[in-house]
């Protein structure tokens, strides 16, 4: 259980549910805004960040692009940072300056997220079997 995941979402229930589902196999930290996320990321150096696109505006001009602004800032600190965006709406039509990322539209099945994580980490059978709803 060495892989570290940071989940950033302002929906407290979603954040807690997702963390509970992933914590059996990963070290999971949670943040409800960009400032908290940056503090945690600088302290723990997460391998993967799951970021809600529509976070309260802090780094960007609007909430619609806050998650993207956060991801770009994280990738400036670690140019190999792995990002999965989640959102109830499509990604905003803005330029996303990231080396790579995934996007999952909410609501989603945990198996969808699991597939993305397995692809990113190349999870073996022990992780695949244990990431469940």
Image (cartoon, grey):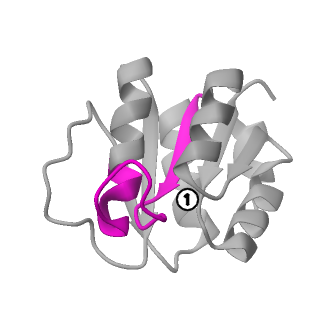
- 6 over 17 or under it: above or below: above
Which residue does the numbered mark 1 point to in the structure image? 113
Residue plotted at (70% across, 28% down):
3
User: In which quadrant will I find the C terminus?
Assistant: bottom right
Q: In the image, residue 104 lies at what x, y percent?
A: 42, 64
Q: Is residue 123 visible?
A: no
Q: In the image, residue 9 lies at what x, y percent?
A: 59, 62
- Is 61 contained in the magenta span? yes
Q: Foreground residue, 52 or 102? A: 52
Location of residue 39 by image quarter:
top right
Q: Residues within 10 Å of mark 1 (few under 14, many from 20)?
A: some
Residue plotted at (78% across, 60% down):
21
Position of 7 with respect to 34 (left or right) is: right
- 65 over 98 or under it: above or below: below
Q: Give the range drawn in magenta.
A: 47-68
- Is 63 contained in the magenta span? yes
Position of 88 with respect to 127 (left or right) is: left
Q: Foreground residue, 77 or 127? A: 77
Location of residue 6 by image quarter:
top right
Residue plotted at (75% across, 52% down):
22
Residue plotted at (76% across, 56% down):
19
User: In which quadrant will I find the N terminus?
Assistant: top right
**The residue tagged with tag 1: helix, strand or loop?**
helix
- 78 over 54 or under it: above or below: above
Q: Foreground residue, 30 or 66? A: 66
Q: In the image, residue 116 lies at what x, y percent?
A: 49, 50
Location of residue 76 by image quarter:
top left
């Amino acid at each position: 259980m060495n892989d570290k995941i940071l989940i950033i979402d302002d929906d407290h229930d979603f954040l807690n549910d997702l963390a509970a589902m992933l914590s059996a196999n990963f070290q999971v930290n949670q943040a409800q805004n960009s400032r908290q996320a940056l503090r945690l990321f600088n302290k723990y150096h997460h391998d993967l960040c799951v970021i809600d696109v529509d976070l309260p505006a802090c780094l960007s001009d609007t909430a619609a692009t806050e998650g993207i602004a956060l991801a770009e800032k994280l990738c400036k600190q670690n140019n190999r940072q792995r990002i999965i965006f989640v959102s109830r709406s499509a990604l905003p039509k803005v330029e996303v300056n990231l080396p790579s990322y995934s996007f999952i539209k909410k609501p989603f099945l945990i198996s969808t997220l699991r597939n993305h994580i397995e692809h990113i980490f190349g999870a073996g059978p022990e992780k695949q079997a244990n990431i469940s709803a």
